[in-house]
Amino acid sequence: MSSEKKDNSFDLLGFGKLAKAIPDSVYEKSTETLLTTFEKLTAPITETTSGFGRYLRQKFDNMVSAEKAIATYTLEKAIRRARKKARKHHLSINPPIHPKSFVKAIEEASKETDPLLHEMWASLLASQMIQQQCHPHFVEILPHFSPAEAHLLVSLYNRDQVGQTGGGYLYFSYDIFRNWVRKAGDTNLETWTYSCVLLCEFGFADVLAPKKNTYPKEKEVTILFRTVSGNGFLETVTP
């Protein structure tokens, strides 16, 4: 997939305009300013659960200065995003259903400087404040994502969009594939990479066999598609 097509795919999901480097000014704020901002941001989602608030504050105190800066910057963005989404769908912002996962998301976000993955963490945090479908397992998976997996997941089609196939495999190993396609009959063969394996292992993608005799070496080419779980994850981490 060309870089132009990747960019276009991400623009459709809102990433293209948002995924920018964290400004230098974020790191220049004093620890006192960061703490004050962090407490103001977390107050609405911790005021009814004082134990959660104390735990969250302690985690923040244990971060190094750069992590505190990124965590606060990400949380600001997440809350703006959550408020906008809540207004649009007539929802309210609430304390996260899985507090432990929310804290871990903040910790992981504080270490992320890649623009694309940073946007994903901000959206995941926002989703935890307004959506019950934000499964805590997503917080465990996102740290294993690189931009390559993110671009790949966005580029895939759903199973009902790939056309006529040879169906599922009775038995297979990911090691047998050398190439893959997005739709049945595609002549543009993509190289099978570890990113493909990861998405399949996460349950966000799966494979289907091409129709017989479609490709010279049928067992080396597979159709890669996005699963329902992949759609759910993508919806959670996109703006």
Image (cartoon, rainbow, N blue to C red):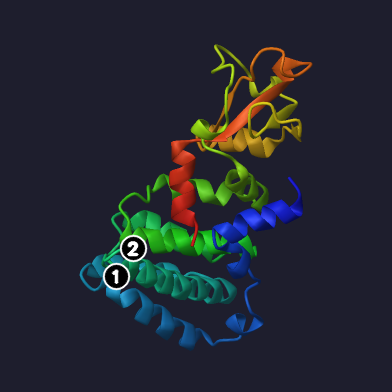
Label 1, residues with CA under 10 Å away: few <14, some 14-19, many ≥20: some
Q: Is residue 4 left or right of residue 63?
A: right
- Tell me where residue 143 appears, x and y as whole percent: 55, 51
Query: At which x and y percent is residue 190?
Result: 74, 35
Residues 133 and 155: in front is: 155
Q: Report the residue marked by disc 2.
A: 129
Q: Position of residue 51 (x, y in %)?
A: 25, 66
How far apart are the two marked residues, 1 and 2, measured between alpha carbons?
Answer: 8 Å
Q: Earlier in the sequence, mark 1 or mark 2?
A: 1
Q: Is residue 185 above or below residue 89?
A: above
Residue appearing at x 72%, y 35% in the figure: 193
Q: Which mark is drawn over residue 95?
A: none
Circle 2 packing at 10 Å, graded few (<14), some (14-19), many (20+), is: many
Instruction: Report the number of discs.
Output: 2
Q: Are marks 1 and 2 in contact (CB under 8 Å)?
A: yes
Which residue sits furthest right? 216
Q: Is residue 55 visible?
A: no
Residue in the foreground of this view, choosing between 1 and 234 = 1
Residue flagged by tag 1: what amino acid is it? Ile
Q: Residue 81: name its quadrant.
A: bottom left
Expressed as whole percent of the image width and height from the top left, the position of residue 34 reads: 48, 83
- Residue 47 appears in which quarter of the rendering? bottom left
Q: Is residue 7 left or right of residue 48?
A: right
Q: Please identify the residue farthest to the left as the structure is shown.
A: 48
Residue in the image at 55% along x and 71% along y: 67
Say which element carries label 2: helix
| Residue to which mark 1 is pinned | 45
Amino acid type at mark 2? Met
Residue visible at 66% across and 71% down in the picture: 21
Q: Which quadrant is the N terminus positioned in?
A: top right
Q: Residue at x 51, y 70 (%)?
A: 63
